[in-house]
Image (tube, coloured by chain):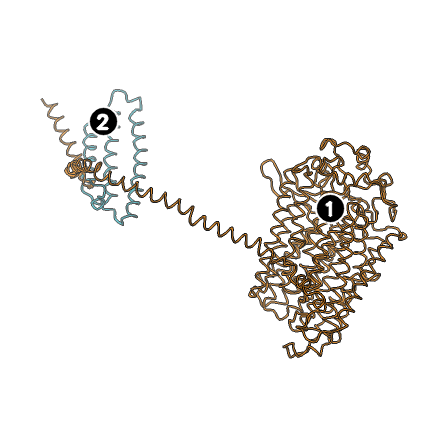
Chain colours: A orange, B cyan
Amino acid sequence: MNSLLQYLWLIPALPLLAAGLSALLKQRSRTLAASLAIGSMVLAFVLSCAAFVSTLGAHGEAATPHNFVWFTFGEKALRLGWMLDPLTASMLVMVTFVGTLIFIYSVGYMAHDENFTRFFTFLSLFAAAMLGLVIANNLLLLFMCWEVVGLASYLLIGFWYHKPSAAAAAKKAFITTRIGDVGFFLGILWLYAETGTLLFYDQGHGCLETSALTAMVTKTTLLGMGVSTAIALLIFCGAIGKSGQVPLHVWLPDAMEGPTPVSALIHAATMVAAGVFLVARVYPLMAAVPVNAPLANSHSQVAMVRPHPGPLPQEREKPAATAEISKPVETSAASPVKTDGGAGAVVQQIAEARADVLPLPGGEGRGEGERSSHHAPVSTALQAVTWIGAITAVFAALVAVAQTDIKRILAYSTVSQLGFMFMGLGTGGVAVGMFHLLTHAFFKALLFLGAGSVIHGCHEEQDIRRMGGLRKLLPVTFATYAVGMMALSGVPLFFSGFWSKDEILHAAWLWEPSKWPFALGLFGAFLTAFYMTRQMWFVFFSPRSSRREETHTSHEPHESPRVMTVPLAVLAVCAVLLSVFGTPLWPWFHSYLGGHGAHPEFSGIPSDTLLIMLVSALVALGGIGLAWRFYSRRPAQRAEDPDPLEALHPETFALLRGKFFIDELYEMSVIRGNAGCARAARWLDDIVWNGVVMAVLYLVLGLSWLNRFFDEFVVNLGFDQGCGGLRSGARLLSVWQNGQVQRYLRVIALGLTVFALIFIWGCGR
Amino acid sequence: MTPLHHYLILSALLFSIGLAGALTRRNAILVLIGIELMLNAANLNFIAFWRYGAHPEALTGVMFVIFSIGLAAAEAAVGLALIIAIYRHRKTTNVDEVNSMKG
């Protein structure tokens, strides 16, 4: 394990090497570029699997970091490092596996593109940065990789930069995520100022470990907010930007201007999930709560003393790995009336020692009897995460209902699902959110690749109203797409999306501060099923003959080549099989991520889990059935026909189709404000500052005129005459100095002779 | 033993030759050689007066001359360097043409 840890850097280094090499290749050497990229990804996948297997044996073990000094700066040494824990390992396997499949798919999809080599260079660069982000044990290293990932995303969205819309979308994505990153960077700086280190784990000195967290939690800053809360919120800003959450979601749908494999890899499966991963990585910071907080945290204080609503489901006893931490919590929790602020505060670290990274998901992992009588207070940061996630989940799902571009629907669906993940993180802990991240990565990559196959087959047509009846023409695509659609909609029992979404809903149901996220999540799930069925119907089922004459292409749609359909099939199989690992019956993934080893015992399903499952299954099936009834009842004859929903309520539909006019709102407020500021600045520059400068200029000019007048007619007149006399005298004398060295010598010799003669004459007398 | 005035005549001759060379030659290097001759005439005088002087055991004349030779070497080095620099700058070593330092 240790030697493996030492060579963990190879996983990001291999794609980086491939990127560097293929950057030097000629445009023509396509095969070499593709095989370099795919080969490096396959190797990285093998290494990731080895790393994954090595973490399987770990039992309740803390993260194993490998730190080294990057450079010393005065007294301080900046240390970077990487680490291997279940969270990292599962992300590594997911990224490399999905990445490999998408790379292979890209060979087919980009076959006709002349910049094939450049495409694979960027893809490899992206993979390297993403893998680096995953293994980083230092917030600064993570941030650097985070920015490189953003750069790769920018380059790939703008891959067809000759399209103005693509160039604009690339710029929009880059700038919007930068807005979040400003907050992230401020959070990093603040964290460094508070703890003096950016390493996550460093044998007790890392910034996510007990001592640093205790120090941060006890300090308060503005509005009585804990320093840890403020830092966590700032870091969450970065996650909002990267993961396209409200209000910074606007870039993600536009990012679909890039090639479809890019949308699948970067803007569905991996990069946008980096925000979720970030929150999961700094989860101890997010969850840190002072037990005796001053007034601002009274909310969570109330939540803490409230008795537990019911028996904890799934009472799987876990080794009390956090006993030494939980004891002080208990003692101060016994007297919660104390409100003297920071002095007596004790950290309640939900995720410390990584033994119970999963605080609330159906109660598992927190089965310690001594604590079961109280609910832990929910930190402000996690509340923010939950609310943002829940609002985004519903908001984006609503917008997706009214879109007509096949990729745009999927993009809004991604935004919505990312909202679900954040909701899972906020309410249920790392395992709940991460499980949805992993299952979503598989089925959303599948859906995007399927959409790419449809677009490819339909000759670059993206409007779902102009498609139809593709079920028979693209059978493989149809079958795999259907699997992805059912996984996303949460069709019960056989699809991974059902289990992961169910778990989030379950965690939201048990969430103490509010039941609203649960309701929003349920509504979001219903909408998800609805819009996916709508899309399926339009693309694959609606009668084709009625609209064929409107499509201007003369060719019939065709099935994609094998190199594209095989990855689809593999992903479809994964989207189904992955459900095995996360069912409530055998929650392998949760106990693995919680560091409890990979062998949890089977357990019965408690009744309220069953109830939630039933409800969410009904909701999903209801959404599908309703959409099916709605759209198949009266198929549209022409592409321009109004959507049946539009006929039902035109105003609402226009609002949804216009994406709630958020883009226009930003255009009106931020962008116009920015332009106004720029214009004001220019006016200030042109009129005010330039005026001041010009005034000074003319003042100086006038003064110098005066000065010159005085100089010429007062000072110079007398001086010139003196100088003239001096000059004529000097001219007279300068005859003696004519530059002829030998004349000088002659004069000296003459003088010497005269001197000698006088001397002789004097002596002779 | 050769009387003193023979040495003095020799040194006076040497000096005159050196002076003539320094005054008449156009080439700066030859002017420098003339100066060196005059310097050596002076050295010869030093040795002669020391040898025939009141305290020949004190080695004062030899010391003087050794210093003087050392100085002459340094002066020759500086002089040649100056001449090379002038040559590089003006493509000539003719001292008549190098007269820009006039009033």
Residue A216 percent across, percent down from the top left: 69, 37
* Residue drawn at the location 63% of the way across and 54% of the way down: A149
How many marks can you see? 2
Circle 2: residue type:
Met
* Residue drawn at the location 10% of the way across and 23% of the way down: A764
Report which residue position mark 1 lands on.
A383
Q: Are marks 2 and 1 in contact (CB under 8 Å)?
A: no
Residue A408 percent across, percent down from the top left: 67, 63
SS assignment at label 2: loop
Q: Nearer the viewer, residue A626 or A732?
A: A626
Label 2: chain? B
Give the Cα distance between marks 2 and 1. Answer: 120 Å
Q: Nearer the viewer, residue A633 or A567?
A: A633
With A726 as the anchor, is A387 left or right in this view? right
Residue A117 percent across, percent down from the top left: 60, 64
Residue B32 percent across, percent down from the top left: 25, 40
Does the image show residue A602? Answer: no
Query: Relative to A501, is A741 above or below?
Result: above
* Residue B1's disc number: 2
Residue at the limit of the structure toward the top, as seen here: B54
Query: Relative to A189, is A600 above or below?
Result: below
For residue A585, what is the image quadrant?
bottom right
